[in-house]
Image (cartoon, rainbow, N blue to C red):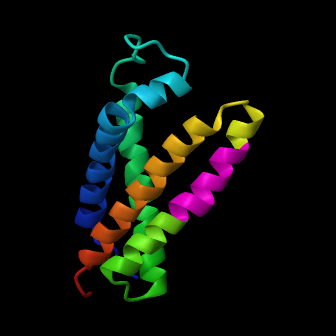
């Protein structure tokens, strides 16, 4: 039940970079509107959020790799599907429930859940493609 640590690290970095594309380019204005931020008032706070984001991406990638190690041989397509499913069904359902109680709108839920589900599909594809070396 080995995992490929380099694949985990690379997929975590790719997930983090994908977040920059998702929130900084693709859905920037929609996300800022859903967060009730003005066009010029992007969230600030230094490096703390980014350090946490990279560390949590690493844990998510490790979780996907661990699921693959329990499941056996997983190809790239199945890896992407499993990653997407974990992101949508576990993260998505818990996030949507939380957002409902916090009175956050569906636009924010769609943006945030979409990022994680697609990002975890990308991580799943990377980890599945990059098999661990045999013991």
Q: Which residue is located at x 29 percent, y 58 percent?
A: 11
Residue 73, position as x, y percentages in the image: 37, 89
Give the quadrant of the C terminus.
bottom left
Q: Which residue is located at x 25 percent, y 76 percent?
A: 129
Residue 66 visible in the current orientation: no
Name the quadrant containing residue 47.
top left
Report the side of 93 relative to 135 (left or right).
right
Residue 82 visible in the current orientation: yes
Q: Using the image, determine if residue 103 lies above or below residue 22.
A: above
18 within the magenta span:
no
Give the quadrant of the N terminus.
bottom left
For this rendering, which residue is in front, 48 or 98?
98
* Helix, strand or loop for the magenta stretch, by majority: helix
Residue 83, position as x, y percentages in the image: 45, 67
Which residue in the rendered view is the most extreme toward the right? 101
Q: Magenta segment, which residues?
A: 86-97
Report the side of 99 relative to 134 (left or right).
right
Q: Which residue is located at x 41 percent, y 36 percent?
A: 52
Q: Using the image, determine if residue 118 lies above or below residue 106.
A: below
Q: Which residue is located at x 47 percent, y 73 percent?
A: 82
How many badges with numbers are in the image?
Answer: 0
Report the side of 18 relative to 65 (left or right).
left
Residue 60, position as x, y percentages in the image: 45, 56
Q: Using the image, determine if residue 67 lies above or below residue 89.
A: below
Residue 90, position as x, y percentages in the image: 61, 60
For this rendering, which residue is in front, 5 or 33?
33
Name the quadrant containing residue 20.
top left
């Amino acid at each position: 039940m080995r995992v490929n640590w380099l694949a985990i690290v690379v997929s975590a970095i790719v997930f983090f970079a994908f977040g920059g594309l998702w929130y900084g380019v693709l859905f920037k204005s929609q996300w800022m509107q859903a967060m009730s931020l003005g066009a010029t008032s992007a969230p600030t706070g230094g490096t703390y959020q980014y350090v946490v984001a990279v560390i949590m991406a690493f844990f998510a990638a490790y979780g996907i790799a661990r699921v693959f190690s329990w499941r056996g041989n997983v190809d790239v397509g199945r890896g992407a599907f499993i990653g997407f499913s974990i992101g949508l069904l576990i993260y998505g359902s818990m996030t949507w429930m939380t957002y409902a109680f916090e009175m956050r709108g569906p636009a924010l839920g769609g943006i945030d859940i979409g990022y994680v589900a697609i990002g975890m599909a990308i991580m799943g594809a990377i980890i599945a493609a990059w098999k661990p070396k045999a013991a």
